[in-house]
Amino acid sequence: MSEGLCLSVRDLSIAFRSGQRETLAVDRVSFDIVKGECTALVGESGSGKSVTALSILRLLPYPAARHPSGSINFQGQDLLQLTERQMRRVRGDDITIVFQEPMTSLNPLHTIEKQIGEILLLHRGLTGAPARARTLEVLNQVGIPNPETRLKSYPHQLSGGQRQRVMIAMALANEPDLLIADEPTTALDVTVQAQIIALLKDLQARLGMSLLFITHDLGIVRKIAQRVCVMKDGKIVEHGSVEQVFASPQHPYTQALLAAEPRPDPAPPQPNAPMLLETDQLKVWFPITSGLMRKVVGHVKACDGLTITLRQGETLGVVGESGSGKSTLGRAILRLISSEGPIAFMGNNLQGLRFKEMRPYRRNMQIVFQDPYGSLSPRMSVADIIKEGLKVHHPDMTERERDQKVVQALGDVGLDPETRFRFPHEFSGGQRQRIAVARAVVLEPSFIVLDEPTSALDMLIQAQMVDLLRDLQKRHNLTYLFISHDLRVVAALASRLVVMRHGQVVEAGDAAELFRNPKTDYTRALFAAAFKLESAPEGVVEQ
Amino acid sequence: MDAKTLPKSAETEIEPGIPPELKPDNEPAGPLGLGGLPRGFEFSPINLRRWQNFKNNRRGYCSLWIFLVLFVLSLLAEFIANDKPLFIHYDGKSFFPIFVTYPDTDFGDVLGTAADYRDPYLQKFLDEHHAIEIWAPIRFSYTTINDRPPSAFPSKPTWLLNAADCDFAAKNGYSKCGTLEYNWLGTDDQGRDVLARLIYGFRISVLFGLVLTIVSSVIGVAAGAVQGYFGGWTDLLFQRFIEIWTSVPELYLLLIISSVLVPGFFVLLGILLLFSWVRLVGLVRAEFLRGRNFEYIQAARALGVSNKVIMFRHLLPNAMVATMTFLPFVMSSSVMTLTALDFLGFGLPPGSPSLGELLSQGKANVQAPWLGLTGFFTVALMLSLLIFVGEAVRDAFDPRKTYT
């Protein structure tokens, strides 16, 4: 192994076995990680980037997984040849890893001090005062404010961003040579994401460690990495320095990935079109009860007095961090959760209507959810899923007519109607989301709530989805309430914009104008984090 | 696919290790289906995989087959162990004594009562008239008393008789060894053939277990579904009721009721049902509580689908997975309960073939080990088979399990 290399992967293959079948997930990839540099591994989901990273620490589900070929050289030894005992010494000491999901990667029953202390005890034998000193030191390094008061905290007492900082602190505790970050910001809000990236960049420069950063977001790569490997279908199709790859991508896939920004072409605001939806001081308060008699002691104000107007043919974008109440707003308007305050839909007040009385209106108002895996019943064929609404709202339609409607709807969303007898699991994420859209449009509604419809999709497919939604809007004169935390997608679709925080509207107005000229600090911070991955000064957004 | 998200949940059914389709968005991802044909009546792919997983578990798969063979054989008990011939051809006429009760006047007797085909007089008459008789392999029914035994009851399995036993029979006026009818597993203390009683007893146990399992599952699933789906006060009140109900001492109540009512098959079923339906409620309730927040349930509500349809079409299939996993275990415990009640003498009416009664005879007649051993091995075999099947079903429904 030549000097200056931290880790060198040669011809690594990973195969997974399930029953009699064996699938090659990664096919002879080779790459190097230079000491003190950040290497990014980019690719869409299923490209094999995460399993590649996990195999460095041999964390795959062996023996269902195996390595038909390859070697991973680290400090003069092949990690794939080490015994499990030797491997345990490498994990958490020389090489550490930070996972995507900060909610589940910390043990909920242990305090922060105990979790970090465990690693120190295992690899360095530190206990008591020295362990505590080191714990405070790393917590300081990762920017946890007042670490002394946080030592006794449990994970649920920390915010998502803080939890991810604690995860990073655990990874740093033993001064590793290599830190693997497996999509560490994907589950976080844009503003927090910007902070975590700034932190990792800073730590890497200060501590001189190497970083392997796995992501699907090219914006992050540009921000943090020096070298980049692009993975597709288990192969590295292109690698090189970040400047070189971004300036002149060679492989068609990299070119497509770089060009996959959603095309901004929002529907214009329609100030003269008829009013479709109006809410006045809409409130969704969840009671907090305590004591034996379940006395209400307070409320979680998910939506706190929201006044929103939406005209026919417009798209109203609703943006905000998670927990700002934007999804709750969408569901409250559709009366899927109870709320207070009038909801005027096409001139009728929906508030207070019973489940049955709502039914005639449901034909006109539909919803598409975020998770394409969770929003389709796995036990029904695509035709049955799309037909279900028709059965409710057009009970006298013949089976033949319904089938025609299904075929038409599938054609509308760009799927082959011949696929309608298959089950959802036979489709990819993007295709499933198209099915969910088909289920909504088959009823010919005038209004659709889109609840983060692109968040679970890969970049390339996001852009296709945005085009599809725009196309459907033009053809059927649809009105959208578009809920998303992804501002690039919102910018591509929204005619008007509402920025939410803590259940309240921070800022609202014409989308183009608002993007050009945000008025509040919070909106500015949100935009900076989303478009430039810059973290805001302290106090504007949550840490 | 990210390795750490591989086994996500029972609903997404992601196969571990298989990366999702990497094809362009517009191309169908899976293997081509049946084109224009709806696939309603074939196994859905999920179930097909479960069936494969089930078959891969050799022990469970074999157990299922053995159990089914035994069960089907015991359903045909009348053709295997019967004190009436299956068929008689005599005097140019055909008789089917197994189905029809003929008066003995048809066979040359004068009493006019139902014919007793084991009566030596009737046998002699049929032989003299060159009648063709087809008998079941075992010429005893579960109530038939062997009136020509080699010893006092309970008498040994015939093939275990030794010279001393034959001597004893000859000296004490019992039937001689050469003329005996075979009792493969001996007789019980009332002179009835143990093997015949075993076959009928197995049948009644399994049928009882099956009926009890099905009825209590239906009630339990319905109760759990209502609680889980509506939640709130419905759930709260129902839960408290179940807590009180389950804290009633079941066994004592059973003993008291069965000493007041005359216990028969259906009375026992009813009494056991009073308590056995609660077993699945918690499970189904939890599945419904979890399921009602799934996005596809929300989507169905947004479509205006009614509560009833949501519960049946969307939520029930989810809950059925958990229920199916439990069924074999519920069944084995139902069988166990019936056997226990019979053993204590509070079960099926006297004279009915029952495994519990066989066991209690074994206890009362320690000098006749064939009684206790037969009962023990039969119950052990039946319960083991059910447990093995149950384990295999549980594993087959587990989406995380991979067979390597």
Image (tube, rainbow, N blue to C red):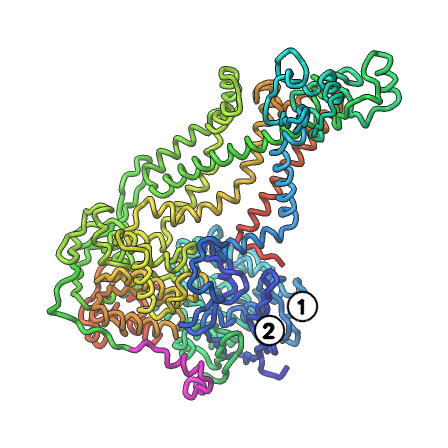
Residue ID at (44%, 53%): A154
Q: Earlier in the sequence, mark 1 or mark 2?
A: 2
Residue A247 in magenta stretch: yes
Q: Quadrant of residue A8?
A: bottom right
The answer to whether residue A154 is above or below residue B66 is below
Give residue A277's position: percent from left, percent from top.
Answer: 17, 60
Residue ID at (65%, 31%): B79
| Crowd tier of the residue under label 2, counting other residues whose Cα lies within 10 Å: few below 14, some 14–19, many 20 or above | many
Residue ID at (36%, 51%): B293
Give residue B100's position: percent from left, percent from top.
Answer: 59, 24
Q: Quadrant of residue B37?
A: bottom left
Residue closest to the eye, A301 or A509: A509
Q: Which amino acid, mark 1?
A: Leu
Q: Is residue A319 left or right of residue A61?
A: left
Residue closest to the eye, B6 or A397: A397
Q: Which amino acid, mark 2?
A: Ser
The label shown at residue A82 is 1
Measure the C-alpha gap from mark 1 to mark 2: 17 Å
Residue B354 in magenta stretch: no
Residue closest to the eye, B211 or A195: B211
Question: What's the chain of the residue with tag 2?
Answer: A
Asked if one can make out residue A324 in the rendered structure from this viewpoint, the answer is no
Residue extent of the magenta highlight: A243-263
